[in-house]
Amino acid sequence: MSSFANKSEHQKVAEAEIESFRNELGPFVVAAETTRMAMLFADAERSNCPIIFANDSLLSLTGYDRDEVLGRSLAFMLVHDADRETLAQLAGKFGGTSDKGVEFLCRRKDDSEFWAAVFISPVRDEAGTVIQYFASFVDLTKHKEDEARSKMLIDELNHRVKNVLATVQAIVWQALRTSSDPKTIQQAIESRLVALSRSHDLLTRENWESAGLHDIIANALEPFERADGLSGRIFIAGDNVRFPPKAALALGIVFNELATNAVKYGALSTDNGALHIDWKTVSSPEGQRVLLQWREAGGPVVAAPSRRGFGSRVIDRVLAHELAGEVRMDFLADGLICSCSLLVPKDAG
């Protein structure tokens, strides 16, 4: 109903009672009209329980004008496709005496939706007859958003834990397969778990959104620089191209393997060796690619290994499967050159 003239006599009487109620209990009504809690009164003596009073907070919450609310059933505030069960719940609240709230998905005048906990209580006359219903609304929108975000974070955490366990399983299995020496196995597992942990720390600092390539490499090599006194012998140059978490973790493992080999057998195993890592970004039919070179110099004379070790298999597998990458190992007399072509994922940010 949009105007007083179009309302039924019964509706006019009901609203007149509210007006009388307002006049008799002025301070209470003023408080009800101005309180921050959204509330309304509905006429219990008509089948559809039309609204006969709505305070300013309810109008602010829903976006309706007062004359667009008065005379209508509370059900009009529910979403367009409210199912029978929801409507039955609402009818049950008007017909019962329970003071428990019920959550409803409601709609505003602009058709945006919000969740609300609705508490409905009967108002009785001196004879005990229910003549009105009092309803209050608690906006649950932020609560629902936080709830959804918490669920998303829990699901993401579960996903990450499964991935971590799978990675740890692969690390342990490959270490056991490669060597039978307990100390060698222990060192291999510890080194790779530390690298995985450091990559997790880096992504945590970045809110698990993405990580820059420069940061990934520096993070992977920092323990070697610190423990082996290699500061000033490692040179990193290139834009901080962003990679999403899964790719960042994979790259962290790759650079840990390369650094481990360089410290054991390559340029970083001598006093005068140096390591240069640089890259550039180019366009390709698949998208942006990073062309990276890992160049060792000044170390012992190197030769291609007679068999592929765990580190080589990890590098090939990670770059090929995780980043649609290509890798080439050139074992030159002056030192190893590892050339990589990495596809930058579209969700890198």
Image (tube, helix red, strand yellow):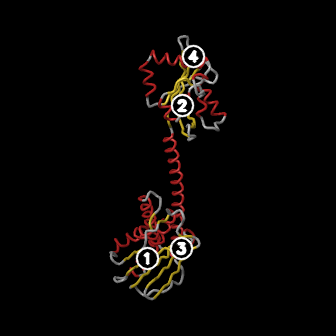
Return the residue nearer the eye: 333 or 293.
293
> Who comes first in sequence, dot 4 or dot 3?
4
- Label 1 close to label 4 by CB (< 8 Å): no
- Label 3 close to label 1 by CB (< 8 Å): no
In the rendered image, residue 216, in percent from the top left (x then y), is placed at: 43, 68
What kind of element bears circle 4?
A: helix
Q: Residue at x 58, y 33 (%)?
A: 77
Name the residue beneath numbered marker 2. Answer: 118
> Who comes first in sequence, dot 4 or dot 2?
4
* Above-or-below relation of 47 to 322: above
Residue 158 falls left or right of residue 9: left
The kind of residue tagged 4 is Val
Return the residue nearer the eye: 336 or 118.
118
Few, some or many residues within 10 Å of mark 2 (<14, 14–19, 20+) = many
Few, some or many residues within 10 Å of mark 1 (<14, 14–19, 20+) = some
CA separation in Å, label 3 and label 1: 17 Å
Name the residue beneath numbered marker 4. Answer: 13
> Who comes first in sequence, dot 1 or dot 4?
4
> Who comes first in sequence, dot 3 or dot 1?
1
What kind of element bears circle 2?
A: strand
In the rendered image, residue 227, in percent from the top left (x then y), is placed at: 34, 71
Residue 248 got which mark? none
CA separation in Å, label 3 and label 2: 56 Å
Name the residue beneath numbered marker 3. Answer: 283
CA separation in Å, label 2 and label 1: 61 Å
